[in-house]
């Protein structure tokens, strides 16, 4: 078994919006992107999170019985990551400036898609994502394959509570602490604030992007 990971770009259209009037266009954007990838939106579960909480390291297991949650039907349970053992179930995570992170264990055949932003990283979220797979699914950190989405550079988005380091630096340090080697990580090093191929909320606030869109990462076991 293997894993497929893909990251959308501005050319694929915004993959999420909080404005209900924009949801029909968002859904069309998703359908178009999934069609290009040869995937079915019907077999998808979205990571649905909220900042109205105190714990930003809440993880939830999903199966094919959950397909469509956050896509065509409402998801009432918030989480910062989804985990599945089901081959063919697509995990979907739209982000503004945070790091979408896929963790795949080929030995236990477990897939996780984790939302790592300032809030979760302040709570050691990258380390805890690995530990969740180790403690609950029998994974070995040394076996994991990990993909990181692009993110703003430190100069645009420092984490003040972590000595002003950048989000990508925080993720790398926490993964290393969890026992993950650099050779296990596939990083997308682009700076979303300066690279116009990706949406960035920070770039939008700076007046450098006209649309406050979201790009997305998807992950699926084949």
Image (cartoon, rainbow, N blue to C red):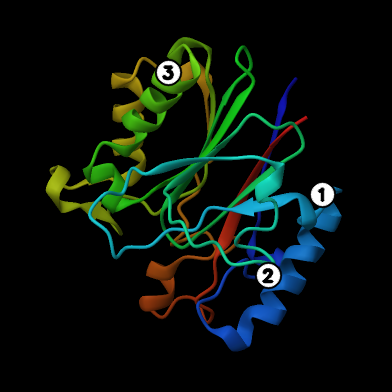
Percent x, y of residue 93: 56, 53
Looking at the rendered structure, the secondary structure element under dot 1 is helix
Chain-order first, disc 3 or disc 1:
1
- Whether 56 is drawn above or below 48: the answer is above
Which residue is labeled 1 in the image?
37
Give the left or right position of residue 217, taking residue 116 as reference: right
Chain-order first, disc 2 or disc 3:
2
Which residue is labeled 2 in the image?
13
Residue visible at 58% across and 69% down in the picture: 16
Residue visible at 41% across and 81% down in the picture: 207
Q: Which class describes the residues within 10 Å of circle 3: few (<14), some (14-19), or many (20+)?
A: some
Give the left or right position of residue 151, taking residue 91 as reference: left
Q: Which class describes the residues within 10 Å of circle 1: few (<14), some (14-19), or many (20+)?
A: few
Looking at the rendered structure, the secondary structure element under dot 2 is loop
For the C terminus, the quadrant is: top right
Mark 2 to mark 3 CA distance (whole Å): 36 Å
Percent x, y of residue 141: 44, 15
Eye-nearest disc, 3 or 1: 3
Mark 2 to mark 1 CA distance (whole Å): 14 Å
Q: Nearer the viewer, residue 173 or 134?
A: 134
Q: Which picture quadrant has residue 41?
A: bottom right
- Whether 70 is drawn above or below 151: the answer is below
Q: Which class describes the residues within 10 Å of circle 2: few (<14), some (14-19), or many (20+)?
A: many
- The answer, for residue 7, to whether it is visible in the render is no
Percent x, y of residue 26: 67, 74
Tell me if label 2 and label 3 are in contact, CB under 8 Å.
no
Residue visible at 33% across and 20% down in the picture: 178
Which residue is labeled 3 in the image?
134
Percent x, y of residue 144: 52, 19
Q: Nearer the viewer, residue 99 or 70?
A: 70
Q: Which mark is residue 109?
A: none
Mark 3 to mark 1 CA distance (whole Å): 31 Å
């Amino acid at each position: 078994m293997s894993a497929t990971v893909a990251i959308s770009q501005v050319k694929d259209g915004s993959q999420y919006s909080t404005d209900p009037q924009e949801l029909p266009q968002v859904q069309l954007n998703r359908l178009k992107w999934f069609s290009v990838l040869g995937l079915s939106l019907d077999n998808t579960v979205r990571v649905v999170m909220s900042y109205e909480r105190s714990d930003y390291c809440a993880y939830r297991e999903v199966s094919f019985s959950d397909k469509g949650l956050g896509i065509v039907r409402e998801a009432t349970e918030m989480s910062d990551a989804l985990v599945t053992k089901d081959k063919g179930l697509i995990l979907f995570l739209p982000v503004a400036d945070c790091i979408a992170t896929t963790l795949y264990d080929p030995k236990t055949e477990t897939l996780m898609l984790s939302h790592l932003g300032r809030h979760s990283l302040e709570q050691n979220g990258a380390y805890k994502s690995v530990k969740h797979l180790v403690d609950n699914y029998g994974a070995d950190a040394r076996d994991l394959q990990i993909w990181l989405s692009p993110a703003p550079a430190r100069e645009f988005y420092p984490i003040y509570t972590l000595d002003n380091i950048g989000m990508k630096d925080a993720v790398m340090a926490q993964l290393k602490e969890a026992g993950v080697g650099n050779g296990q990580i596939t990083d997308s090093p682009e700076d979303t604030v300066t690279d116009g191929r990706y949406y960035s909320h920070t770039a939008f606030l700076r007046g450098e992007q006209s649309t406050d869109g979201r790009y997305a990462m998807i992950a699926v076991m084949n």
